[in-house]
Structures are given as structure tokens and as C-alpha cells.
Image: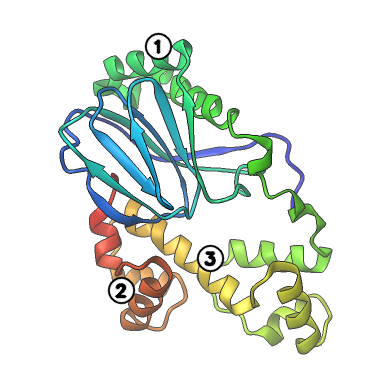
Amino acid sequence: MKHCVHPEINIYYYEYAKDCSYWTFKNVFAPYWRFYWNATPGGEIFYKGRSIVLNPDSIVLISPNTCFSTKAHTSFEQFHVHFIADCPFDHVYQNIYTFPITEDMKDKMIKMKKHMPDKQKNMHFKMMLFSLIYDGLLKIPKDAFITNLHQYDSRIVKILELLDKNTSWVFTNNELAEKIDMSCNGFIRLFSSETGTSPLQYSRRKRIEKACLLLHFSKQSIDDIALRTGFQDRYYFSRVFKQVTNNSPAQFRKAGNQ
């Protein structure tokens, strides 16, 4: 969809948690990457019938919009990061990827644990954090990437970029069609053929993804988030949000930064 020079990383949250006895959640879903390393055993992830046991010898990367569940069998220590990665890592199949941890990565996390109390002022800490994420992303296999995205019709690419950037506005099909000089019916057919979904469904999903970020990483009220993502009121927003995520906005916010 766009020329990839180097993938930019936006980190939304990171923590070294010393007591994860609470880490039991069902149907976790969010539009950002998750990086996990358990310094001690005791955590487990469930995804499509698979059981993934977290331990000090491996790291776990979970791609955006992957729905999974977790369980804490006992208290354990965990380092985790929530982040968004730019092209090409914004087009990876939904999945959970596990890799053996390298000595270099383990050394970085041990050092970051030591500097966690003054992390906001420690530039060395931030550089190690970004380096750690890049180390993990480099392990994503080539077949995990949705390679046919660059083959989209250039007119559809223009609309996708518009919808991705304007998550506070609801465009009609006529408005979108006019932007690329097509008839409304022709535009809808082309968009659906290229993406496998309708323009309105795509726009709704992008607005819900934006709402997910605001619910987890801002203190805005649910009413404000509904308006900011183009929904008429909180009740309609809550109904659509639950259809997409299987959770109400309040439930999703409560799950928070696990």
C-alpha cells in the first residue's frame, strides 16, 4: 500500500510486572502488537485450540487484532510492551508467534528491569526498549506477511489511506466514490472485490480500532470516545463495539494493560 523505508514504532505502554497473579482474561483483542517475556513461569495463552506456555526461555509476539485468552496458574513476573509498527509490520496475519530468547535480548531486559524506576529519564533505557522490539519483529517469518496488499487498485489505495487517517468521520459511499471519480455502484463493487469487505464495514472497523486505543491509552470518557470515532451516541457505539470485539467498551477498558 505504501513505500516502506523503515518501520516506525509507536510504543503505547510497557511494564515490568512483579505480580501477575491477576493475569486471567477471556477473548483479549486489540489493534496493536503485544510483546511478552515471562521472567518466571506461571502464565499461559490460549489461541485457536493451542496452548502457549510462557517461560523465561522464549518471547511471545501477538499481532494486531488477534483474539486470545490468558490464564495465570500462579504469580509470575512479566515484561510486556504494547506498540504499533508501521509498514510492513502493519500487515501481518493475525497469529501468536513464539521464539527462543537470545542472550542479547535477555541481557537487555535484565538491564531494563534494573533501570525501570527511572525509565522516563533514562535515554539508554528507551534505546534498549526500541532495540528489543526490532529484535522481536525481525524474527517474524516471511510467510506471516500479507504480501498481496501492494496489488490493490491505486484508487482503492487512496480510499484506504483516507479511511485509515480519518477515524472521526463517517463517509458515505457517494462521498468516497466522488473522491476517485467513480460511480457509487462501481466503487462499491471494486472496493468489495479488492478488500473482501464493504467501504462502510472497513470504515467501522478502523473506527473501532481507534476506539480501542483510546480506551486503553487515554482517560477520555466513553461518551467522548464515541463522538471522537464518529458514532452518534454512546449506546450505538457500545452496540457496535461489542459486535466487533465481543466486549463492551467498559469491559475492554477494564481489561486494560495486561
Q: Are marks 3 and 1 in contact (CB under 8 Å)?
A: no
Residue 22's disc is none
* Residue 218 visible within the image: no
Disc 3 to disc 1, how far (Cα)? 37 Å
Left or right relative to 150: residue 51: left
Residue 217 in the image, given as x and y percentages of width and height: 34, 51
Residue 223's disc is 2
> How many numbered dots are placed on residues in this image?
3
Foreground residue among 169 and 63: 63
Q: Residue at x 68, y 61 (%)?
A: 161
Q: Secondary structure at mark 3?
A: helix
Residue 107's disc is 1
**Hey, what amino acid is under mark 1?**
Asp
* Mark 1 residue crowding within 10 angstroms, few (<14) / some (14–19) / many (20+): few
Quadrant of the rendering where the C terminus is positioned = top left
Disc 2 to disc 1, how far (Cα)? 44 Å
Q: Residue at x 48, y 55 (%)?
A: 65
- According to the picture, the residue beneath numbered tag 3 turns out to be 206
* Mark 3 residue crowding within 10 angstroms, few (<14) / some (14–19) / many (20+): many
Q: Secondary structure at mark 2?
A: helix
Foreground residue among 25 and 253: 25
Marked residue nearer the N-terminal end (2 or 1): 1
Q: Residue at x 27, y 58 (%)?
A: 253
Left or right relative to 139: residue 33: left
State the image quarter where residue 203 is shown: bottom right
Image height check: is 59 above or below 166? Answer: above
**Hey, what amino acid is under mark 3?**
Lys
Between disc 3 and disc 1, the foreground one is 1
Disc 2 to disc 3, how far (Cα)? 18 Å
Residue lying furthest front? 49
Marked residue nearer the N-terminal end (3 or 1): 1
Between disc 2 and disc 1, the foreground one is 1
